C-alpha cells in the first residue's frame, strides 16, 4: 500500500508541477468569466446560461486532463525509461498502474473541486440561487472523467500516445452517441445493422447516463436512485478497465 | 551461494510482422556471480549486456533458460527489496529535487520515513551531491545525474547492486570515485554486477569478468585467468650497436623486429628462444639495453575475442 501511495503522490506532484495544468485552470476561469458576461447580455434566463457555461467548462477541462494527461501516465514512464528503476523496486506492476491512476484521479478531483468552488462563487456573486442539482451534475462529471481516464490508461499500456489519444477521444464521442445507436437498432429492419448497432451499444460506455448538465443548469435535480446507479455504473466500468490495464501491463516486456 | 545464477539463457525477439526476421539477442548464456563479488560484464554496444540485466530484473522475459537472483527466480518482486539498479543513461523525474527523488525511491523500497531521512544525507555525501540536495534534477549535469542514479540504487543498502555502464558520462575524477564506491560496497559484503566499456576499470576492481559478444558469452573468469590462459606472454628485447644483417639468422625467432639506426627492438613470443637470441646478439657485439616481459592485457583479449566472434 505504501508503494502504491508513493507512486500516486509522485504522479500528483508531477502533474501539479506541469505548467499545462495551470493553463487549463486559467482556461476554466476565462470560460466561467465569459458565462457571467453572456449572462448579463441575455434578457432573462441569466442563471441558466451561467450554470450551463460553467458546468460545460468544468466538464471540458476535466475530460481534457483525463485524456491528455491520462495517455501519458504509463507511456511517458516507458518512453523516458523511468519505468526501469521503478519496476526494479519491490513494487508489482499492478501497484504501479493503480498508483499512476490514483495520482491523476486525485489531480482531477482537486481540479474539479477548485473549478466548482470558483463556479459556485460566480453563481453566488451573480445573485443566482445555488441548486442542489449542480452538485449532482459535478459528481457525475467526476465519474465520467475517471472513466475516460481509465480508457486513456488502458490504451497507453499497449499503444503510442497519439493512438491512445485518438482511441480515447473516439470512445468519448461514441460514448455520448450510444443512445442514437440504440435508436438506429430499434428502427432498422436489416438484421446485420441491427445486431451491429446493438453490439456497439452494449460494448461502448453510455456516457450520456453521466451527463445531466442540461437539467441541472435549469435547477432540476435527478432522482437519487438514478444518481447512485449512474455512479455505480461508471465506477464498475472504470474498475473493469483498470483490471484490463493491469493484465496487459503485466505481460509487457521493457 | 550465488547472488546471480544464469543458466543457458536465450532471448529471441519474435518478428512483429511475418516478413520480418526474428532476432536472437542472447544465445545460451550461462554464468554465475558469487555473493560479495565484483563481476564486470564486458561487451560492445549491442552485445546483449543490457538485455541480460533487464532479464535479471524481470523487465524482460527470457525465451528459454533459468535465472535466479538472490535465490529467487528473476522478477520476484520481494527480492527487489534487496537489490539496487542503475540503468544506462538514466533519465529521472527532473521536477524532483535530489532529496525528494531519493525519498521517493526509499518509499518504493519499503523504507520507513525515519530510515529514509536518516539515510539520505550520508548517501548524498557519499556521491558528492550534498550541496545540490535542494536542486531540481533538471538543473543537474550528466555526471550529477549519474551520481544521483547511483544514490537511488543504494538507497535501501541493497545486498546486490546491478549497474549498467556506471562510469559513462563521468570525468576521470568521477570515475575514480565510482570505482572507490564499488570497492567500498565489496568491503561491506555487497555483490556488484556491472557492465562497462572502460577496460582499465574492470582490470582494477573486478574479481571476475565475463566477455559477451553478439549474445554469446565468450570468456569467463578472473582477469588473470583470462589473460594468462588465453594470451601468450611476450618479451621485448632492446639492444644497441647492431645492424639488420647481423641479426638476420635469429630474426625468424621474433614476432616483430623494429630497427631504428643502430637500435633494434625485437618482440619474442616467449622465454623459449630468449637464450638463443641473446647469444646471437652477444656474438654480433650488440649492447643489451633492456629485456621487458610483456603480459597481455584485458584489452587485447577483448579485441581478440570480439574480432574472433565478428
Image (tube, rainbow, N blue to C red):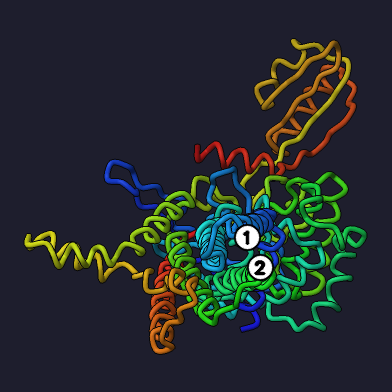
Q: Residue at x 78, y 59 (%)?
A: B148
The image quadrant of residue B303 is top right
Q: Residue at x 76, y 61 (%)?
A: B96
Tell me residue B5's x, y (percent): 55, 69
Q: In this rendering, is residue A6 above or below A172?
A: below
Q: Residue at x 77, y 47 (%)?
A: B142
Tell me residue A12's x, y (percent): 66, 68
**Along the viewing direction, whichever of A48 and B129 lies nearer the viewer:** A48
Point out the residue furthest to the right here: B131
Question: Would residue B221 be visible to someone looking at this image?
Answer: no
Q: In this rendering, is residue A207 above or below B210?
A: below
Tell me residue A94's x, y (percent): 50, 75
Query: Which image quarter holds the N terminus of chain B?
Result: bottom right
Residue count near mark 1 (Cα–Cα under 10 Å), binned few <14, some 14–19, many ≥20: many
**Along the viewing direction, whichever of A16 and B310 lies nearer the viewer:** A16
Q: In this rendering, is residue A41 above or below A204?
A: above
Residue count near mark 2 (Cα–Cα under 10 Å), binned few <14, some 14–19, many ≥20: some
- Whether residue A166 sits left or right of residue A195 in the image: it is right
**Along the viewing direction, whichever of B241 and B41 lies nearer the viewer:** B41
The image quadrant of residue A168 is bottom left
Q: Which residue is under mark 2?
A: A126
At mark 2, the secondary structure is loop
Res B42 label:
none
Q: Which residue is under mark 1?
A: A36
At mark 1, the secondary structure is helix
Amino acid at each position: 500500500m505504501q508503494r502504491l501511495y508513493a507512486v500516486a503522490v509522485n504522479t500528483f506532484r508531477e502533474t501539479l508541477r506541469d505548467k499545462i495544468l495551470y493553463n487549463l485552470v486559467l482556461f476554466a476561469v476565462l470560460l466561467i468569466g465569459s458565462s457571467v458576461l453572456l449572462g448579463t447580455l441575455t434578457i432573462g434566463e441569466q442563471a441558466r446560461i451561467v450554470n450551463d457555461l460553467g458546468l460545460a467548462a468544468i466538464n471540458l477541462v476535466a475530460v481534457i486532463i483525463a485524456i491528455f494527461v491520462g495517455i501519458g501516465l504509463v507511456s511517458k514512464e516507458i518512453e523516458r525509461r523511468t519505468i526501469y528503476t521503478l519496476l526494479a523496486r519491490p513494487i508489482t506492476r499492478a501497484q504501479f498502474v493503480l498508483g499512476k491512476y490514483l495520482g491523476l484521479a486525485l489531480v482531477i478531483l482537486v481540479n474539479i473541486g477548485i473549478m466548482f468552488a470558483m463556479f459556485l462563487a460566480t453563481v453566488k456573486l451573480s445573485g443566482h440561487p445555488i441548486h442542489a442539482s449542480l452538485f449532482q451534475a459535478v459528481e457525475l462529471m467526476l465519474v465520467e472523467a475517471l472513466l475516460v481516464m481509465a480508457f486513456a490508461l488502458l490504451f497507453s499500456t499497449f499503444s503510442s500516445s497519439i493512438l491512445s489519444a485518438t482511441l480515447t477521444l473516439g470512445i468519448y464521442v461514441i460514448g455520448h452517441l450510444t443512445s442514437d445507436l440504440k435508436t438506429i437498432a430499434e428502427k432498422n429492419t436489416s438484421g446485420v445493422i441491427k445486431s451491429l448497432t446493438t453490439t456497439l451499444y452494449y460494448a461502448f460506455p453510455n456516457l450520456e447516463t453521466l451527463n445531466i448538465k442540461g437539467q441541472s443548469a435549469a435547477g432540476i435535480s435527478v432522482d437519487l436512485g438514478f444518481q447512485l446507479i449512474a455512479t455505480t455504473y461508471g465506477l464498475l466500468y472504470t474498475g473493469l478497465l483498470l483490471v484490463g490495464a493491469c493484465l496487459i501491463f503485466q505481460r509487457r516486456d521493457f | 551461494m550465488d547472488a546471480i545464477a544464469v543458466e543457458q539463457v536465450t532471448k529471441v525477439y519474435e518478428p512483429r510482422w511475418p516478413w520480418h526476421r526474428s532476432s536472437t539477442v542472447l544465445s545460451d548464456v550461462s554464468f554465475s556471480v558469487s555473493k560479495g563479488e565484483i563481476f564486470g560484464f564486458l561487451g560492445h554496444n549491442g552485445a546483449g549486456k543490457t538485455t541480460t540485466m533487464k532479464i535479471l530484473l524481470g523487465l524482460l522475459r527470457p525465451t528459454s533458460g533459468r535465472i535466479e537472483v538472490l535465490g529467487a527466480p528473476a522478477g520476484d518482486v520481494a527480492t527487489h527489496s534487496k537489490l539496487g539498479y542503475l540503468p544506462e543513461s538514466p533519465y529521472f523525474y527532473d521536477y524532483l529535487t535530489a532529496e525528494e527523488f531519493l525519498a521517493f525511491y526509499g518509499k518504493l523500497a519499503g523504507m520507513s520515513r525515519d530510515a529514509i531521512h536518516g539515510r539520505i544525507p550520508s548517501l548524498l555525501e557519499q556521491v558528492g551531491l550534498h550541496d545540490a540536495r535542494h536542486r531540481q534534477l533538471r538543473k543537474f549535469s550528466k555526471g550529477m545525474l549519474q551520481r544521483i542514479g547511483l544514490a537511488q540504487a543504494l538507497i535501501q543498502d541493497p545486498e546486490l547492486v546491478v549497474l549498467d555502464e556506471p562510469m559513462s558520462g563521468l570525468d576521470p575524477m568521477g570515475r575514480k570515485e565510482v570505482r572507490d564506491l564499488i570497492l567500498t560496497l565489496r568491503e561491506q559484503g555487497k555483490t556488484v554486477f556491472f557492465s562497462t566499456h572502460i577496460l582499465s576499470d574492470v582490470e582494477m576492481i573486478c574479481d571476475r569478468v565475463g566477455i559477451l559478444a553478439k549474445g554469446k558469452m565468450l570468456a569467463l573468469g578472473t582477469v588473470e585467468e583470462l589473460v594468462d590462459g588465453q594470451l601468450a606472454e611476450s618479451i621485448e628485447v632492446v639492444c644497441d650497436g647492431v645492424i639488420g644483417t647481423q641479426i638476420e639468422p635469429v630474426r625468424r625467432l621474433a614476432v616483430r623486429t623494429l630497427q631504428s639506426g643502430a637500435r633494434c627492438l625485437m618482440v619474442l613470443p616467449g622465454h623459449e628462444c630468449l637464450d638463443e637470441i641473446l647469444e646471437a646478439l652477444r656474438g654480433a657485439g650488440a649492447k643489451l639495453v633492456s629485456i621487458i616481459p610483456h603480459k597481455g592485457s584485458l584489452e587485447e583479449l577483448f579485441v581478440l575475442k570480439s574480432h574472433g566472434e565478428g
